[in-house]
Image (cartoon, grey):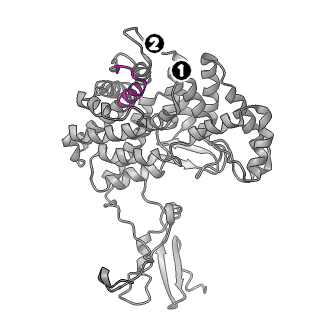
Amino acid sequence: MSEESAGTPDTLTIRDNRTGKEYEVPILEGDVVRAMDLRQIKVNDDDFGMMSYDPAFSNTAFTRSNVTFIDGGNGILEYRGYPIEQLAERSSFLEVSYLLLKGDLPSQSELDAFVHDVTYHTYVHENITDLLDAFRYDAHAMGMMISAVSALSTFYPEAKDVQDPHNRWIQINRLVAKMPTLAAFAYRYHRGLPIVYPENELSYTANFLNMLFRIGVKEYKPNPVLERALDVLFILHADHEQNCSATTMRVIGSSEADPYSALAGAMAALYGPLHGGANEAVLRMLHRIGDVKNIPAFIEGVKNREERLMGFGHRVYKSYDPRAAIIKRTAEEVFEVTGRNPLLDIALELERIALEEDFFISRNLYPNVDFYSGLIYQALGFPVEMFPVLFAIPRTVGWLAQWQEMVEDDEQRIARPRQVFTGPRQRTFVPVEERG
Protein backbone atom coordinates (compact mmCIF):
# COMPACT_ATOMS: atom_id res chain seq x y z
CA MET A 1 0.00 0.00 0.00
CA SER A 2 1.37 3.43 -0.86
CA GLU A 3 2.07 6.06 1.81
CA GLU A 4 -0.85 8.12 0.50
CA SER A 5 -3.32 5.26 0.96
CA ALA A 6 -1.98 4.05 4.28
CA GLY A 7 -4.92 5.53 6.16
CA THR A 8 -4.95 7.43 9.46
CA PRO A 9 -3.93 6.08 12.86
CA ASP A 10 -6.54 4.03 14.71
CA THR A 11 -8.25 2.96 11.51
CA LEU A 12 -8.26 -0.18 9.43
CA THR A 13 -7.97 0.15 5.66
CA ILE A 14 -9.80 -2.63 3.83
CA ARG A 15 -9.36 -3.25 0.11
CA ASP A 16 -12.15 -5.13 -1.67
CA ASN A 17 -10.40 -6.98 -4.47
CA ARG A 18 -13.75 -7.58 -6.17
CA THR A 19 -14.16 -3.88 -6.92
CA GLY A 20 -10.75 -2.37 -6.18
CA LYS A 21 -12.37 0.00 -3.66
CA GLU A 22 -10.78 0.80 -0.31
CA TYR A 23 -12.65 1.47 2.91
CA GLU A 24 -11.43 3.02 6.16
CA VAL A 25 -12.93 1.55 9.32
CA PRO A 26 -12.34 3.06 12.81
CA ILE A 27 -10.52 0.85 15.33
CA LEU A 28 -12.19 1.23 18.70
CA GLU A 29 -10.74 0.77 22.15
CA GLY A 30 -9.86 -2.88 22.69
CA ASP A 31 -8.74 -3.47 19.08
CA VAL A 32 -12.27 -3.98 17.76
CA VAL A 33 -14.18 -2.68 14.78
CA ARG A 34 -17.92 -2.24 14.57
CA ALA A 35 -19.54 -4.97 12.52
CA MET A 36 -21.96 -2.38 11.09
CA ASP A 37 -19.00 -0.49 9.60
CA LEU A 38 -18.50 -3.46 7.29
CA ARG A 39 -21.94 -2.90 5.76
CA GLN A 40 -20.56 -0.11 3.57
CA ILE A 41 -18.52 -2.71 1.66
CA LYS A 42 -20.66 -3.59 -1.39
CA VAL A 43 -20.27 -4.69 -4.97
CA ASN A 44 -23.51 -3.00 -6.03
CA ASP A 45 -25.46 -0.21 -4.35
CA ASP A 46 -28.44 -2.46 -3.73
CA ASP A 47 -26.36 -5.16 -1.99
CA PHE A 48 -27.02 -5.83 1.70
CA GLY A 49 -23.35 -5.22 2.49
CA MET A 50 -20.56 -7.18 4.09
CA MET A 51 -21.21 -9.22 7.25
CA SER A 52 -18.88 -11.11 9.57
CA TYR A 53 -19.46 -14.84 10.05
CA ASP A 54 -18.56 -16.01 13.54
CA PRO A 55 -20.12 -19.29 14.77
CA ALA A 56 -20.44 -19.37 18.59
CA PHE A 57 -19.29 -15.72 18.87
CA SER A 58 -15.71 -16.99 19.07
CA ASN A 59 -14.25 -13.64 18.06
CA THR A 60 -17.15 -11.22 18.39
CA ALA A 61 -17.58 -8.64 21.17
CA PHE A 62 -21.30 -8.71 21.94
CA THR A 63 -21.19 -5.84 24.42
CA ARG A 64 -19.08 -3.31 26.28
CA SER A 65 -18.88 -4.28 29.94
CA ASN A 66 -17.16 -3.10 33.11
CA VAL A 67 -18.28 -5.99 35.33
CA THR A 68 -15.60 -8.69 35.01
CA PHE A 69 -12.13 -8.64 33.45
CA ILE A 70 -10.33 -11.80 32.35
CA ASP A 71 -6.79 -12.07 31.00
CA GLY A 72 -6.69 -15.72 30.06
CA GLY A 73 -3.06 -15.70 29.00
CA ASN A 74 -1.88 -14.53 32.41
CA GLY A 75 -4.51 -16.21 34.57
CA ILE A 76 -6.12 -12.98 35.80
CA LEU A 77 -9.75 -12.66 36.95
CA GLU A 78 -11.08 -9.40 38.41
CA TYR A 79 -14.53 -8.32 39.57
CA ARG A 80 -14.92 -4.57 39.02
CA GLY A 81 -11.12 -4.29 39.12
CA TYR A 82 -10.56 -6.33 42.30
CA PRO A 83 -8.44 -9.51 41.94
CA ILE A 84 -10.40 -12.67 42.69
CA GLU A 85 -7.66 -13.78 45.08
CA GLN A 86 -8.22 -10.75 47.35
CA LEU A 87 -12.00 -11.09 47.28
CA ALA A 88 -11.93 -14.82 48.06
CA GLU A 89 -9.56 -14.29 50.98
CA ARG A 90 -10.98 -11.14 52.57
CA SER A 91 -14.58 -10.67 51.48
CA SER A 92 -17.95 -12.37 51.88
CA PHE A 93 -20.27 -13.51 49.13
CA LEU A 94 -22.90 -10.83 49.80
CA GLU A 95 -20.21 -8.12 49.88
CA VAL A 96 -18.94 -9.37 46.50
CA SER A 97 -22.54 -9.48 45.29
CA TYR A 98 -22.97 -5.82 46.16
CA LEU A 99 -19.70 -5.03 44.36
CA LEU A 100 -20.82 -6.79 41.18
CA LEU A 101 -24.31 -5.29 41.24
CA LYS A 102 -23.40 -1.73 42.25
CA GLY A 103 -19.88 -1.32 40.87
CA ASP A 104 -18.06 -0.49 44.11
CA LEU A 105 -17.43 -2.11 47.45
CA PRO A 106 -20.07 -1.06 49.99
CA SER A 107 -19.63 0.98 53.12
CA GLN A 108 -20.57 -0.78 56.34
CA SER A 109 -24.01 0.82 56.36
CA GLU A 110 -24.59 -0.05 52.69
CA LEU A 111 -23.53 -3.65 53.29
CA ASP A 112 -25.74 -3.92 56.38
CA ALA A 113 -28.73 -2.64 54.42
CA PHE A 114 -28.08 -5.03 51.53
CA VAL A 115 -27.67 -8.03 53.85
CA HIS A 116 -30.88 -7.04 55.65
CA ASP A 117 -32.86 -6.74 52.41
CA VAL A 118 -31.60 -10.05 51.07
CA THR A 119 -32.23 -11.79 54.39
CA TYR A 120 -35.83 -10.64 54.58
CA HIS A 121 -36.62 -11.65 51.00
CA THR A 122 -35.64 -15.29 51.47
CA TYR A 123 -39.17 -16.64 51.90
CA VAL A 124 -41.15 -17.73 48.84
CA HIS A 125 -44.91 -17.91 48.32
CA GLU A 126 -46.39 -21.17 49.57
CA ASN A 127 -47.78 -21.89 46.09
CA ILE A 128 -44.18 -22.46 44.97
CA THR A 129 -44.05 -25.52 47.24
CA ASP A 130 -47.16 -26.82 45.47
CA LEU A 131 -45.35 -26.37 42.16
CA LEU A 132 -42.36 -28.38 43.39
CA ASP A 133 -44.66 -31.10 44.74
CA ALA A 134 -46.03 -31.57 41.22
CA PHE A 135 -42.71 -32.91 39.92
CA ARG A 136 -41.88 -36.60 39.64
CA TYR A 137 -39.99 -38.07 42.57
CA ASP A 138 -36.82 -38.35 40.45
CA ALA A 139 -37.01 -34.96 38.69
CA HIS A 140 -33.62 -33.29 38.30
CA ALA A 141 -33.12 -30.47 40.79
CA MET A 142 -32.00 -28.07 38.05
CA GLY A 143 -35.17 -28.65 36.05
CA MET A 144 -37.21 -27.94 39.18
CA MET A 145 -35.22 -24.76 39.82
CA ILE A 146 -35.65 -23.45 36.28
CA SER A 147 -39.41 -23.92 36.51
CA ALA A 148 -39.63 -22.35 39.97
CA VAL A 149 -37.62 -19.27 38.99
CA SER A 150 -39.71 -18.80 35.87
CA ALA A 151 -42.88 -19.12 37.96
CA LEU A 152 -41.71 -16.32 40.27
CA SER A 153 -42.38 -13.84 37.47
CA THR A 154 -46.09 -14.50 37.88
CA PHE A 155 -45.91 -13.62 41.58
CA TYR A 156 -44.24 -10.28 40.86
CA PRO A 157 -45.91 -8.86 37.73
CA GLU A 158 -44.40 -5.44 38.45
CA ALA A 159 -41.03 -6.96 37.50
CA LYS A 160 -41.94 -6.32 33.86
CA ASP A 161 -41.13 -2.63 34.39
CA VAL A 162 -37.44 -3.17 33.74
CA GLN A 163 -36.76 0.51 33.00
CA ASP A 164 -37.46 1.58 36.59
CA PRO A 165 -34.14 1.40 38.53
CA HIS A 166 -35.84 1.15 41.93
CA ASN A 167 -38.08 -1.67 40.74
CA ARG A 168 -35.09 -3.48 39.20
CA TRP A 169 -33.23 -3.33 42.51
CA ILE A 170 -36.17 -4.88 44.36
CA GLN A 171 -36.32 -7.80 41.91
CA ILE A 172 -32.54 -8.24 42.13
CA ASN A 173 -32.75 -8.49 45.92
CA ARG A 174 -35.56 -11.00 45.64
CA LEU A 175 -33.71 -13.25 43.24
CA VAL A 176 -30.45 -13.22 45.20
CA ALA A 177 -32.43 -14.02 48.36
CA LYS A 178 -34.74 -16.72 47.04
CA MET A 179 -32.32 -18.85 45.03
CA PRO A 180 -30.90 -20.72 48.07
CA THR A 181 -34.43 -21.24 49.39
CA LEU A 182 -35.63 -22.79 46.13
CA ALA A 183 -32.51 -24.94 45.91
CA ALA A 184 -32.95 -26.21 49.46
CA PHE A 185 -36.63 -26.97 48.85
CA ALA A 186 -35.71 -29.02 45.75
CA TYR A 187 -33.05 -30.90 47.72
CA ARG A 188 -35.44 -31.71 50.58
CA TYR A 189 -38.09 -32.82 48.09
CA HIS A 190 -35.68 -35.39 46.66
CA ARG A 191 -34.81 -36.62 50.11
CA GLY A 192 -38.46 -36.97 51.09
CA LEU A 193 -37.87 -34.56 53.97
CA PRO A 194 -40.11 -31.71 55.15
CA ILE A 195 -38.95 -28.32 54.00
CA VAL A 196 -37.02 -26.11 56.38
CA TYR A 197 -37.82 -22.42 56.22
CA PRO A 198 -35.17 -19.68 56.29
CA GLU A 199 -33.67 -18.51 59.58
CA ASN A 200 -33.08 -14.77 59.42
CA GLU A 201 -30.39 -14.67 62.09
CA LEU A 202 -28.03 -16.87 60.05
CA SER A 203 -25.60 -15.77 57.34
CA TYR A 204 -26.41 -16.31 53.67
CA THR A 205 -24.48 -19.57 53.39
CA ALA A 206 -25.25 -20.77 56.93
CA ASN A 207 -28.95 -20.28 56.26
CA PHE A 208 -28.63 -22.30 53.05
CA LEU A 209 -26.88 -25.15 54.87
CA ASN A 210 -29.52 -25.01 57.60
CA MET A 211 -32.38 -25.33 55.09
CA LEU A 212 -30.58 -28.25 53.47
CA PHE A 213 -29.44 -30.37 56.37
CA ARG A 214 -31.37 -29.57 59.55
CA ILE A 215 -33.28 -32.56 60.91
CA GLY A 216 -36.26 -32.15 63.23
CA VAL A 217 -36.38 -29.13 65.52
CA LYS A 218 -32.75 -29.32 66.56
CA GLU A 219 -30.77 -26.14 66.10
CA TYR A 220 -28.38 -26.47 63.19
CA LYS A 221 -24.96 -24.81 63.40
CA PRO A 222 -22.75 -25.47 60.40
CA ASN A 223 -19.05 -25.91 60.97
CA PRO A 224 -17.51 -22.45 60.35
CA VAL A 225 -14.86 -23.95 58.06
CA LEU A 226 -17.53 -25.52 55.85
CA GLU A 227 -19.66 -22.37 55.94
CA ARG A 228 -16.67 -20.29 54.84
CA ALA A 229 -15.72 -22.83 52.15
CA LEU A 230 -19.18 -22.56 50.59
CA ASP A 231 -18.96 -18.77 50.76
CA VAL A 232 -15.61 -18.87 48.92
CA LEU A 233 -17.02 -21.20 46.27
CA PHE A 234 -19.93 -18.80 45.78
CA ILE A 235 -17.51 -15.88 45.35
CA LEU A 236 -15.47 -17.78 42.75
CA HIS A 237 -18.59 -18.68 40.73
CA ALA A 238 -20.32 -15.29 40.95
CA ASP A 239 -19.45 -14.11 37.43
CA HIS A 240 -17.22 -15.01 34.52
CA GLU A 241 -17.74 -12.43 31.81
CA GLN A 242 -19.60 -13.20 28.54
CA ASN A 243 -20.06 -16.95 28.78
CA CYS A 244 -22.94 -18.96 27.32
CA SER A 245 -25.39 -18.36 30.19
CA ALA A 246 -24.52 -14.66 30.65
CA THR A 247 -25.05 -14.10 26.93
CA THR A 248 -28.39 -15.93 27.19
CA MET A 249 -29.38 -13.62 30.06
CA ARG A 250 -28.52 -10.58 27.96
CA VAL A 251 -30.25 -11.87 24.81
CA ILE A 252 -33.50 -12.66 26.62
CA GLY A 253 -33.28 -9.44 28.60
CA SER A 254 -32.83 -7.43 25.40
CA SER A 255 -36.50 -8.04 24.62
CA GLU A 256 -37.31 -6.35 27.98
CA ALA A 257 -38.47 -9.63 29.48
CA ASP A 258 -38.65 -9.59 33.27
CA PRO A 259 -35.49 -10.73 35.11
CA TYR A 260 -37.10 -13.95 36.41
CA SER A 261 -37.83 -15.16 32.88
CA ALA A 262 -34.41 -14.09 31.64
CA LEU A 263 -32.69 -15.78 34.56
CA ALA A 264 -34.61 -19.01 33.99
CA GLY A 265 -33.23 -18.99 30.44
CA ALA A 266 -29.70 -18.39 31.71
CA MET A 267 -30.13 -21.33 34.09
CA ALA A 268 -31.24 -23.50 31.18
CA ALA A 269 -28.02 -22.59 29.36
CA LEU A 270 -26.00 -23.44 32.46
CA TYR A 271 -27.82 -26.78 32.71
CA GLY A 272 -26.01 -28.05 29.61
CA PRO A 273 -23.13 -30.44 30.37
CA LEU A 274 -20.68 -28.31 28.37
CA HIS A 275 -21.27 -25.40 30.74
CA GLY A 276 -22.45 -26.22 34.25
CA GLY A 277 -21.88 -29.95 34.45
CA ALA A 278 -18.11 -30.14 34.17
CA ASN A 279 -17.37 -30.75 37.87
CA GLU A 280 -19.68 -33.78 37.81
CA ALA A 281 -17.68 -35.12 34.85
CA VAL A 282 -14.48 -34.65 36.88
CA LEU A 283 -15.86 -36.78 39.70
CA ARG A 284 -16.88 -39.50 37.28
CA MET A 285 -13.36 -39.46 35.80
CA LEU A 286 -11.69 -39.69 39.23
CA HIS A 287 -13.98 -42.57 40.24
CA ARG A 288 -13.17 -44.36 36.98
CA ILE A 289 -9.40 -44.02 37.60
CA GLY A 290 -10.00 -45.41 41.07
CA ASP A 291 -6.43 -45.40 42.40
CA VAL A 292 -3.23 -43.39 42.02
CA LYS A 293 -1.49 -46.46 40.59
CA ASN A 294 -3.88 -46.38 37.62
CA ILE A 295 -2.97 -42.82 36.64
CA PRO A 296 -0.05 -43.65 34.27
CA ALA A 297 -2.29 -45.85 32.16
CA PHE A 298 -5.00 -43.18 32.17
CA ILE A 299 -2.50 -40.51 31.09
CA GLU A 300 -1.38 -42.70 28.20
CA GLY A 301 -5.03 -43.06 27.25
CA VAL A 302 -5.37 -39.27 27.22
CA LYS A 303 -2.32 -38.89 25.00
CA ASN A 304 -3.68 -41.51 22.61
CA ARG A 305 -7.10 -39.80 22.61
CA GLU A 306 -8.70 -42.83 24.20
CA GLU A 307 -9.55 -40.94 27.43
CA ARG A 308 -10.77 -37.41 28.18
CA LEU A 309 -9.03 -35.36 30.84
CA MET A 310 -11.90 -33.51 32.53
CA GLY A 311 -11.39 -30.34 34.57
CA PHE A 312 -8.33 -29.26 32.59
CA GLY A 313 -8.13 -26.49 30.03
CA HIS A 314 -10.53 -23.62 29.47
CA ARG A 315 -11.98 -21.68 26.53
CA VAL A 316 -10.51 -18.45 27.99
CA TYR A 317 -7.60 -19.38 30.26
CA LYS A 318 -4.34 -20.38 28.60
CA SER A 319 -2.59 -20.73 31.96
CA TYR A 320 -3.61 -21.85 35.44
CA ASP A 321 -7.20 -20.83 36.23
CA PRO A 322 -6.79 -18.49 39.26
CA ARG A 323 -9.97 -19.91 40.79
CA ALA A 324 -8.54 -23.44 40.73
CA ALA A 325 -5.65 -22.48 43.00
CA ILE A 326 -8.05 -21.00 45.56
CA ILE A 327 -10.38 -24.02 45.43
CA LYS A 328 -7.42 -26.38 45.87
CA ARG A 329 -6.50 -24.68 49.16
CA THR A 330 -10.15 -24.64 50.22
CA ALA A 331 -10.45 -28.37 49.54
CA GLU A 332 -7.59 -29.11 51.92
CA GLU A 333 -9.32 -27.06 54.66
CA VAL A 334 -12.63 -28.83 54.08
CA PHE A 335 -11.10 -32.30 54.22
CA GLU A 336 -9.50 -31.50 57.58
CA VAL A 337 -13.08 -31.29 58.89
CA THR A 338 -14.89 -33.93 56.83
CA GLY A 339 -12.07 -36.43 56.44
CA ARG A 340 -9.84 -36.82 53.41
CA ASN A 341 -11.50 -37.98 50.24
CA PRO A 342 -9.23 -40.56 48.56
CA LEU A 343 -10.16 -39.01 45.22
CA LEU A 344 -8.14 -35.94 46.24
CA ASP A 345 -4.90 -37.93 46.02
CA ILE A 346 -5.79 -38.93 42.46
CA ALA A 347 -6.59 -35.30 41.61
CA LEU A 348 -3.33 -34.01 43.08
CA GLU A 349 -1.27 -36.56 41.16
CA LEU A 350 -3.08 -35.77 37.92
CA GLU A 351 -2.36 -32.07 38.45
CA ARG A 352 1.31 -32.74 39.22
CA ILE A 353 1.75 -34.66 35.98
CA ALA A 354 -0.13 -32.09 33.92
CA LEU A 355 2.03 -29.26 35.25
CA GLU A 356 5.26 -31.11 34.43
CA GLU A 357 4.69 -32.85 31.09
CA ASP A 358 5.07 -30.93 27.86
CA PHE A 359 2.10 -32.76 26.31
CA PHE A 360 -0.26 -30.90 28.67
CA ILE A 361 1.68 -27.64 28.97
CA SER A 362 1.92 -27.20 25.19
CA ARG A 363 -1.86 -27.63 24.95
CA ASN A 364 -2.58 -25.22 27.84
CA LEU A 365 -4.17 -28.04 29.82
CA TYR A 366 -4.09 -26.56 33.32
CA PRO A 367 -6.63 -27.26 36.08
CA ASN A 368 -9.76 -25.11 35.90
CA VAL A 369 -12.38 -24.19 38.49
CA ASP A 370 -14.26 -27.46 38.02
CA PHE A 371 -11.34 -29.72 38.88
CA TYR A 372 -11.59 -29.42 42.67
CA SER A 373 -15.04 -27.89 43.23
CA GLY A 374 -16.92 -31.19 42.84
CA LEU A 375 -14.75 -32.78 45.53
CA ILE A 376 -15.70 -30.02 47.96
CA TYR A 377 -19.39 -30.24 47.13
CA GLN A 378 -19.28 -33.98 47.62
CA ALA A 379 -17.51 -33.56 50.97
CA LEU A 380 -20.21 -31.12 52.06
CA GLY A 381 -22.84 -33.79 51.41
CA PHE A 382 -24.29 -32.69 48.08
CA PRO A 383 -25.33 -35.27 45.45
CA VAL A 384 -23.95 -34.65 41.97
CA GLU A 385 -27.34 -33.55 40.61
CA MET A 386 -27.11 -30.51 42.91
CA PHE A 387 -23.82 -29.36 41.39
CA PRO A 388 -25.32 -27.17 38.61
CA VAL A 389 -27.78 -25.75 41.17
CA LEU A 390 -24.85 -24.79 43.41
CA PHE A 391 -23.33 -23.10 40.37
CA ALA A 392 -26.56 -21.23 39.59
CA ILE A 393 -27.05 -19.76 43.09
CA PRO A 394 -23.95 -17.51 43.06
CA ARG A 395 -23.99 -16.99 39.28
CA THR A 396 -27.41 -15.38 39.73
CA VAL A 397 -25.55 -12.30 40.94
CA GLY A 398 -23.36 -12.20 37.83
CA TRP A 399 -26.33 -12.75 35.53
CA LEU A 400 -28.21 -9.90 37.20
CA ALA A 401 -25.18 -7.59 36.99
CA GLN A 402 -24.85 -8.37 33.28
CA TRP A 403 -28.61 -7.94 32.76
CA GLN A 404 -28.71 -4.60 34.57
CA GLU A 405 -25.73 -3.33 32.57
CA MET A 406 -27.47 -4.36 29.35
CA VAL A 407 -30.72 -2.59 30.32
CA GLU A 408 -28.83 0.64 31.07
CA ASP A 409 -26.74 0.51 27.87
CA ASP A 410 -28.11 2.94 25.28
CA GLU A 411 -26.34 1.05 22.46
CA GLN A 412 -28.19 -2.19 23.14
CA ARG A 413 -31.31 -3.16 21.25
CA ILE A 414 -33.25 -6.40 21.00
CA ALA A 415 -30.78 -9.08 19.96
CA ARG A 416 -31.15 -10.04 16.30
CA PRO A 417 -28.15 -11.84 14.75
CA ARG A 418 -27.86 -12.30 11.01
CA GLN A 419 -27.48 -15.57 9.15
CA VAL A 420 -25.78 -16.85 6.03
CA PHE A 421 -28.64 -18.54 4.18
CA THR A 422 -27.66 -21.86 2.57
CA GLY A 423 -31.05 -23.36 1.68
CA PRO A 424 -32.94 -23.60 -1.63
CA ARG A 425 -34.75 -20.59 -3.14
CA GLN A 426 -37.99 -19.95 -5.08
CA ARG A 427 -39.28 -23.50 -5.25
CA THR A 428 -42.71 -24.14 -6.77
CA PHE A 429 -45.28 -25.87 -4.60
CA VAL A 430 -46.51 -29.24 -5.92
CA PRO A 431 -49.76 -30.76 -4.48
CA VAL A 432 -49.15 -33.90 -2.48
CA GLU A 433 -50.97 -36.14 -4.96
CA GLU A 434 -48.62 -35.01 -7.75
CA ARG A 435 -45.36 -35.52 -5.87
CA GLY A 436 -43.24 -38.43 -7.03
What main secondary structure does the magenta stretch of the protein show? helix
Q: Position of residue 401 (x, y in %)?
A: 38, 44
Could one spot residue 121 in this view of the protein?
yes
Left or right of 187 in this view: 121? left
Left or right of 193 in this view: 242? right
Question: Around disc 2, counting alpha carbons within 10 Å, would you say few (fewer than 14), some (14 to 19), or many (20 or more)?
Answer: few
Which residue is depicted at the point 27% across and 53% down?
Answer: 256
Query: CA gap, disc 1 to disc 2?
Result: 11 Å
Which residue is depicted at the point 80% across and 40% down?
Answer: 296
Give yes or no for residue 60 being in the magenta stretch.
no
26 w.r.t. 117: above or below? below
Q: Amino acid at mark 2?
A: Lys
Label drawn at residue 226: 1
225 or 377, which is in the foreground? 377
What secondary structure is found at the residue carrying circle 2?
loop
Residue segment shown in magenta: 182-196
199 w.r.t. 217: above or below? below
The quadrant in which the C terminus is found is bottom left
Which residue is depicted at the point 32% across and 56% down?
Answer: 254
Q: Place residue 152 in its image quadrant.
A: top left
Q: Position of residue 162 (x, y in %)?
A: 25, 48
429 or 101, which is in the foreground? 429
Residue under pointer 2: 221
Q: Place residue 287 in its image quadrant.
A: top right
Question: Around disc 1, counting alpha carbons within 10 Å, would you say few (fewer than 14), some (14 to 19), or many (20 or more)?
Answer: many
